[in-house]
Image (cartoon, grey):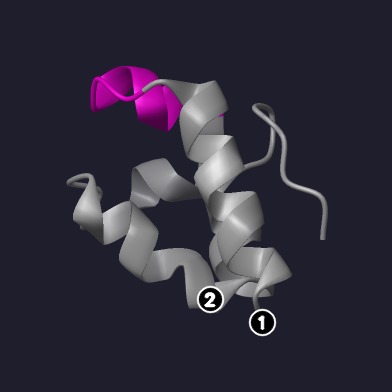
Amino acid sequence: MEISRETLISEIVENCPEVMPAFQAIGMHCMGCAMASGESLEQACAAHGVDPDAFLEHLATILESK
């Protein structure tokens, strides 16, 4: 799965559960909450004060290593 700034958090959780610890490490603990179903990666990063581009790179690294 290709993850971008526009990818919904719910899509990421469904298709790439192995990245969930990365979300939890930056304070995104409500991966199953109602906001996750309609919130993009960019929106979630903004809400948690995280650079979306750096986080995308981190997720890519995790996905490449699997």
Q: In the visual, does 33 lie left or right of 66?
A: left
Instruction: Give the numbered dot on residue 47.
Output: none
The residue sitting at 24% across, 20% down in the picture is 49
Disc 1 designates what residue? 66
Magenta residues (range):
42-50
The residue sitting at 68% across, 39% down in the picture is 7
**Residue 35 in view, yes or no:** yes
Q: What main secondary structure does the magenta stretch of the protein show?
A: helix
Quadrant of res 8: top right
* Rendered location of residue 31, percent (x, y): 35, 59
> Which residue in the rendered view is the most extreme toward the bottom?
66
The verdict on residue 39 being magenta is no
Quadrant where the image shows the N terminus: bottom right
Instruction: Give the numbered dot on residue 17.
Output: 2
Q: Secondary structure at mark 1?
A: loop
Tell me which amino acid carries mark 2.
Pro
